[in-house]
Image (spheres, grey):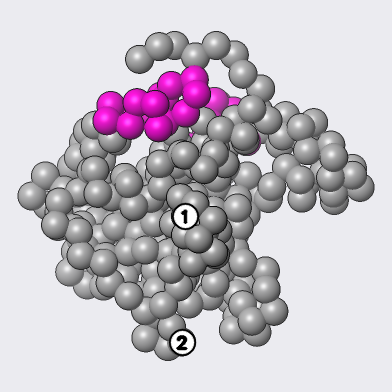
Amino acid sequence: MKKQTKITAWERVTLARELERPKASDYIDAIFEDFIELHGDRNFGDDKAIIGGIATLNEMAVTVIGEQKGKNVKENMERNFGMPQPEGYRKALRLMKQAEKFKRPIITFIDTPGAYPGMGAEERGQGEAIAKNIMEMSSLKVPIICIIIGEGSSGGALAIGVGDKVVMLENAIYSILSPEGFASILYKDSSKAKEAAETMKITAKDLKKLGIIDKIITEPEKGAQNDFDNITKSIKKYLIQAIRKLKKLSEEELLEQRYQKYRII
């Protein structure tokens, strides 16, 4: 794979948001076998901005969850542009608790501009749903690996982002909110988003240096879609190795390591 030239944080933001960039479903189809999608939160409805279900990875049963954007305008409308509502996070939690019951490792794919801020979502407990997921994930007694494949913004990302290992694609971003939102709050001017992107330290390289993530998956300069096969092979290899190591830990050791990981951060 060709080595990248130096590009700016804003250019990585642009790459992370590209419509052609592979989505969670693309990675699920390429990496796992026998994926069976499960629907609904057993409370309100089914949120298509989050997909999830059971699959096999190298003949090992796993639970896979991903934030799903669309590949065109019609799909993005159906998927709410990858912005989950409370029922999406509750669906994810239902699947994670099921994974714990059957001792299946959990893999999540993060790709969202943020949790949906609509009135209905707020009325149904958006903040509570995100907070509960973070709390519950911190104590799940199975290995959790989180992979940021595009945008990883705000609580929308954190709600499925508490992992024993956190991995980022090279042109993905991970931040407390969008650069536009940051610029609007700190600079009172959303047009300063480019400047904000540099200040926020949202790139994989910055976050690896800060100890927020554990590994960077390299990708071509113009995006993951230009070498998708090799990227999925790298992710699959990493998942198999990481899960194998994590499964050697006792439940107590797993939870203690997870606690220390986020306690230090």
Residue 28 position in % (x across, y down) = 28, 50
Q: Residue at x 37, y 79 (%)?
A: 40
From what the image shows, is residue 221 above or below residue 262? above
Residue 247 position in % (x across, y down) = 19, 49
Q: Earlier in the sequence, mark 2 or mark 1?
A: 2
- Asked if one can make out residue 245 in the rendered structure from this viewpoint, the answer is no
In the drawing, does residue 138 fall left or right of residue 55?
right
Write down the residue under mark 2. 44
Which stretch appears magenta?
A: 202-231
From what the image shows, is residue 124 above or below residue 216? below
Write down the residue under mark 1. 70
Residue 264 quadrant: top right
In the drawing, does residue 208 fall left or right of residue 186?
left
Q: Amino acid at mark 2?
A: Phe
From what the image shows, is residue 101 above or below residue 191? below
- Asked if one can make out residue 126 in the rendered structure from this viewpoint, the answer is yes
Secondary structure type for disc 2: loop
- Report the disc number at residue 83: none
Residue 220 position in % (x across, y down) = 43, 21
Q: Residue at x 37, y 86 (%)?
A: 42
Q: Residues within 10 Å of mark 1 (few under 14, many from 20)?
A: many
Secondary structure type for disc 1: loop
Q: Residue at x 40, y 41 (%)?
A: 22
- Residue 89 covered by magenta stretch: no
Q: Amino acid at mark 1?
A: Gly
Q: Residues within 10 Å of mark 2 (few under 14, many from 20)?
A: few
Residue 15 position in % (x across, y down) = 56, 33
Camera-side residue: 107 or 195? 195
- Residue that lies at the very extreme toward the left in this rendered image: 59
Looking at the rendered image, the quarter that the C terminus falls into is top right
